[in-house]
Image (spheres, rainbow, N blue to C red):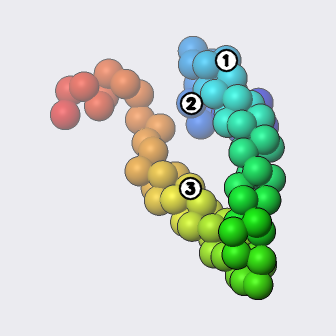
Amino acid sequence: MPSFILDVFGARVMSAVYGCMLTAWSVAGIVGPQLVALIKDRWPQQAGHYAALTGAAFVACGLVASFLLSNRPFAARAAD
C-alpha cells in the first residue's frame, strides 16, 4: 500500500496520506463490529439483511469518494 500511495499522491504527502489511511482502517476495525452488534441487538430477525445493506452503503460511499478524488498537484487545482 505505501508504494501505491507514493505513485498516486507523491512523496511529499505520502506519510500524511498513509497515516490517515491507517487511522481510518483502525477506526473501521473498532466501529464496524460495534455497528453490526447494534444492528443485531435492535433487529434480530433481519440482522443479516440490515448489516449487508449497511456494508453496501459504506462501500457505495467509498466508491463515490474515490471518484471525487483527484491526483492532480495542488498548484494545478489552485490555478483553476
| One can see residue 63 in this view | no
Q: Which residue is mark 3?
A: 62
Task: Specify few, some or many for label 1: CA neighbours under 10 Å numbering under 14, 14-19, or 20 or more.
Answer: some
Residue drawn 80% across the image and 43% down it: 29
Contact, mark 1 vs mark 2 (Cβ under 8 Å): no
Task: Specify few, some or many for label 3: CA neighbours under 10 Å numbering under 14, 14-19, or 20 or more.
Answer: few
Location of residue 25 by image quarter: top right
Q: For this view, does 27 lie left or right of residue 64?
A: right
Contact, mark 3 vs mark 2 (Cβ under 8 Å): no
Residue 46 placement (x, y as % from top left):
72, 83
Q: Which residue is mark 1?
A: 15
Tell me if residue 24 comes above or below residue 40 in the rendering: above
SS category of the residue bearing label 3? helix
Given the image, on which type of amino acid does mark 2 rest? Phe
SS category of the residue bearing label 1? helix
Residue drawn 70% across the image and 75% down it: 43
The numbered disc on residue 65 is none
Given the image, on which type of amino acid does mark 3 rest? Gly
Between marks 1 and 2 in the image, the one whose residue lies nearer the viewer: 1
Please identify the quadrant where the C terminus is shown.
top left
Residue 77 placement (x, y as % from top left):
29, 31
Residue 35 placement (x, y as % from top left):
71, 55
Q: Which residue is mark 2?
A: 9
Tell me if residue 57 comes above or below residue 77 in the rendering: below
